[in-house]
Image: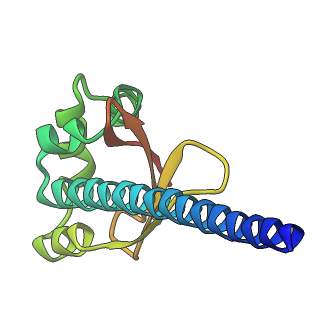
């Protein structure tokens, strides 16, 4: 009889412990999913804001959403002294309709399994940008490069 009580208590403790472990695992998993969703939202917002700034030709705004390296590379590629001048040169020949198309060309976002860059896929647009790669700098997602 004493052995039966001990077994009953053992089973009870086992199931209580299993329940606690399951609850803790659920909370940790839920927190991780929430954090990932928040990062995806921030990535999406940055990608959309960058495309909108490019579409409007706002050099200062677009450059503020780029990493220092990306700003320098764009200025060098456009043979301009500053990033805002390079954005204006890069987008200067676009018509109003093409600017609107570029500003609304966001398609989707994702994080690769390994790597620290976030990716934003871009729909067809007059600048033929198909993807933005964003890097988190000081808690803010900035465009590091595009293809």
* Towards the viewer: 21 or 61: 21
User: Residue at the spot x=26%, y=62% of the render?
Assistant: 48
The answer to whether 9 appears left or right of 20 in the picture is right
Measuring from the top left, give residue 80's x and y in whole percent.
26, 28
Measuring from the top left, give residue 42's x and y in whole percent.
30, 55
Residue at the top extreme of this rendering: 81
User: Residue at the spot x=62%, y=60% of the render?
Assistant: 21
Q: Quadrant of residue 3?
A: bottom right
Residue at the front extreme of this rendering: 1
* Towards the viewer: 24 or 101: 24
Task: Describe the colour scheme in one phrase.
Answer: rainbow
Q: Quadrant of residue 19?
A: bottom right
User: Residue at the spot x=44%, y=57% of the render?
Assistant: 31
* Towards the viewer: 42 or 63: 42
Q: Quadrant of the N terminus?
A: bottom right
Q: Quadrant of residue 102?
A: bottom left
Measuring from the top left, give residue 60's x and y in whole percent.
12, 37
């Amino acid at each position: 009889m004493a052995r039966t009580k001990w077994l009953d208590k053992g089973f009870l403790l086992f199931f209580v412990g299993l329940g606690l472990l399951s609850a803790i695992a659920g909370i940790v998993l839920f927190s991780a999913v929430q954090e990932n969703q928040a990062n995806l939202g921030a990535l999406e917002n940055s990608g959309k804001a960058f495309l909108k700034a490019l579409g409007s030709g706002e050099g200062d705004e677009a450059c503020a959403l780029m990493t220092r390296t990306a700003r320098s590379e764009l200025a060098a590629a456009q043979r301009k002294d500053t990033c805002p001048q390079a954005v204006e040169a890069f987008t200067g020949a676009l018509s109003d309709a093409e600017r609107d198309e570029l500003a609304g060309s966001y398609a989707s976002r994702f994080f690769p399994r390994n790597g620290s860059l976030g990716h934003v896929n871009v729909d067809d647009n007059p600048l033929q940008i198909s993807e933005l790669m964003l890097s988190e700098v000081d808690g803010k997602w900035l465009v590091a490069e595009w293809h």
